[in-house]
Amino acid sequence: MTYDMNDAELPRGSDLIPDGSFVKVIMHLRKGGLDGQGEADRGLLKATKTQGSDVKMLDCEFTVTAGPHIRRKFWQTFTVVGGKVDEQGVSIGWKISKGVFRAMIDSALGLDSQDMSEAAKAKRMLRGLADLHGITFAAKVRVEPANDPRYSDSNRLDRVVLPGEPEYAKVMAGEGVAAAPSHRPARPPAAAATTPPAWSGTAAAAPGAPAPRMWERPATASPAPAARQPAAPPAPAPVAGGPAWLNG
């Protein structure tokens, strides 16, 4: 008996939000054990795994709150301390992260990004990065190809969707919006196999049987499985009298 594998459905490697999707998300912060600059950020930051690096990051979990992808999650870190610096000695990673955080506030509160009135500026003031815990905003999500073939692709925040953009009102209302793929180049496909795959084994063809398949050769060592990620530490509790997005 033979089996035709051509019409079989391929397994899904992960449950990803489609590339370019517009979604309403809530961001929760996961404590990493390192102190930030103030009392509110005690134990909030996370160290990078890069040997010898001084980078400290904010570890964020995003959960879709409405629409067709509701309850789907993705994770991302943002540099807030250390790394490469500009001519003034300011962390370049922090400058990028700070811009993203400001956009989150504008999206959450419906602020015009050009509004620099005293009232608008007051709403963008944080007592600490912990104030960002629980912020809800409109986002565009991308699919980021994995650099290592042992791991699956992942979702990332492509950008924050701001008031005035055509998708903003519908996203914040929980309505579905057509995706706009980010058009990033996908990971190059693997070259055609020239050596037997790891699951191969020796098998002689029976008389009259089809010719041996390409994997019917001695096995080679398979790569070690990836280490299991540790459980996420508890998120910081909201601070009394916090920002506007926590008082709804």
Image: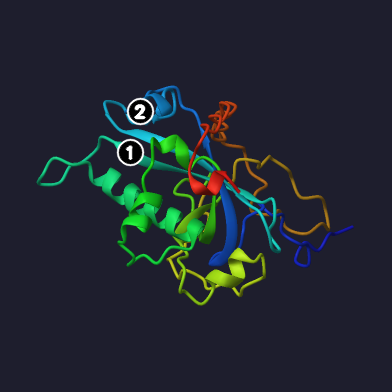
Residue 45, percent from left and from top = 41, 30
| Rendered position, 67 above or below 76 | below
Residue 93, percent from left and from top = 28, 45
Q: Which residue is mark 2?
A: 36
Identify which amino acid the numbered label 2 is placed on: Gly
Identify which amino acid the numbered label 1 is placed on: Val
Q: Quadrant of the N terminus?
A: bottom right
Judge left or right: residue 202 versus residue 136. Answer: right
Residue at image location 72% in from the left, 54% down from the top:
11
Is residue 85 in view?
yes
Residue found farthest to the left: 87
Judge left or right: residue 55 versus residue 188. Answer: left
Residue at image location 53% in from the left, 56% down from the top:
137
Quadrant assignment, res 211: bottom right
The residue closer to the viewer here, 196 or 47, is 47
Residue 67, percent from left and from top = 69, 63
Label pair 1/2, CB-CB below 8 angstroms: yes
